[in-house]
Amino acid sequence: MKKPTVLSFCAIFLRKEMQHIYRQVTGLQRYETVAVTEERSCETVYPFPRVAVLPRPRIAFLQRIWRKFALRQPSLLYRGYYDALRSAIDPLDADLMHIYFGHTGVHLLPFIQRWDRPAVVSFHGMDAMPRAHDKTYAPRMRVLLETVPLVFARSQSLARVLVERGCPPEKIRINRTSIPLKDFSYRRRQPVENGELRIVQACRLIEKKGIDLTLHAFAEMVKKFPAARLSLIGEGPQEASLRELAQELQLSESVDFSGFLPPEKLAEKLHEAHLFVHPSRVTAKQDQEGIPNSLLEAMATGLPVVATLHGGIPEAVEHGKTGLLCPENDAPALSRSLLELAENFPLRDAMGAAASDAVAREFSSESQIQKLESYYDEARELFRRSYL
């Protein structure tokens, strides 16, 4: 029996930090999938054989003007993007489309409204926020949320934001990050000798990840543990300023900027570490996290976490059991939590084991893929009923 087909639409397939999407797309069992994209990227990092790259829209200038001003068509149509999209996907005869990121869903709204198959949209964090420079964005997002049969959110906190944006609560399904436990296996750590604690933060080097807070907290910690080391794993626009801050705090010899690491290298770093830190915060532009992928990967390997009461993090980290949670933007509290775990191996040991168990229970690839495919089934059935 032929498997149903889902089109996994991502405007760029894929950026380095989109490993969570790659895991979903490649992990499907009951569904065939074709990735649909405007741009193919990082092919060696994320190899995938079934990728449909949209052709460049071709539309005569006068026809474009006619569509825009005489017919008052939305940009997706008058720019020819809709025609290019249909030419790419119609031959695939798919059963539904999964659109990654809410802003892409808003962009594709005219297509969603005209397609004779169901589409679902997943939100990941910043894509649920309003656009101050575009007064039409919020109304269009509301229409999107009302149009699609189901809406996916990475966390309960993000689901609440989507309800505030106008999504009917009954449409929301929690689509959590899936972690391949075989790649991030549990490893019990041993007591640290000579204070040589190894601490890791893995993320994009951007404001909402709070890496500057990590550096300030670590600067206090090394006063008591001068042999401790901090590894910052990732790339991003703040790297230069963070290197300058590390130098100002006299941490140049204690902090490693490791850059982006592929999964196997990241797992090695996590297995070598004793603590994982991730002080996420809401930015001035209201950017916030769902549940950070790297945090779950670290927990899976048996690392206790020091993080913040932010976004979906408390849904993954149970304070006092699998890690310690601090208020946002509170470097002294972050430092105290790091010191508490640094000085208490039995507590680190117990928290690390509990963290690994929690990820295996709530975030394993197998369970999350099963849920995702059940949501696909549900979306198709809801769409079918709407046309009865």
Image (tube, rainbow, N blue to C red):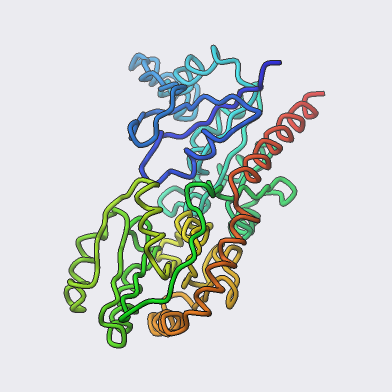
Q: Percent x, y for residue 115?
A: 61, 23
Quick check: 302 left or right of 147?
A: left
Residue 250: quadrant of the picture: bottom left
Which residue is at a point 37% across and 53% down the rendered structure image? 266
- From the viewer's side, name the closer residue of 270 and 218: 270
Residue 262: quadrant of the picture: top left
Residue that protrudes farthest toward the right in the picture: 388
Residue that protrudes farthest toward the top in the picture: 91
Q: Is residue 242 visible?
A: yes
- From the viewer's side, name the closer residue of 221 and 106: 221
Q: Is residue 12 visible?
A: no
Above/below status of 176 relative to 299: above
Above/below status of 108 relative to 329: above
Which residue is at a point 49% across and 59% down the rendered structure image? 301
Quick check: 245 left or right of 114?
A: left
Q: Percent x, y for residue 295?
A: 47, 60
Q: Where is the N terminus found, in terms of image quarters?
A: top right
Above/below status of 67 relative to 214: above
Which residue is at a point 42% across and 67% down the rendered structure image? 276
Above/below status of 143 relative to 385: below
- From the viewer's side, name the closer residue of 381 and 68: 381
Q: Where is the C terminus found, in terms of image quarters?
A: top right
Q: Percent x, y for residue 95?
A: 65, 22
Q: Percent x, y for residue 93?
A: 60, 15
Residue 229: quadrant of the picture: bottom left
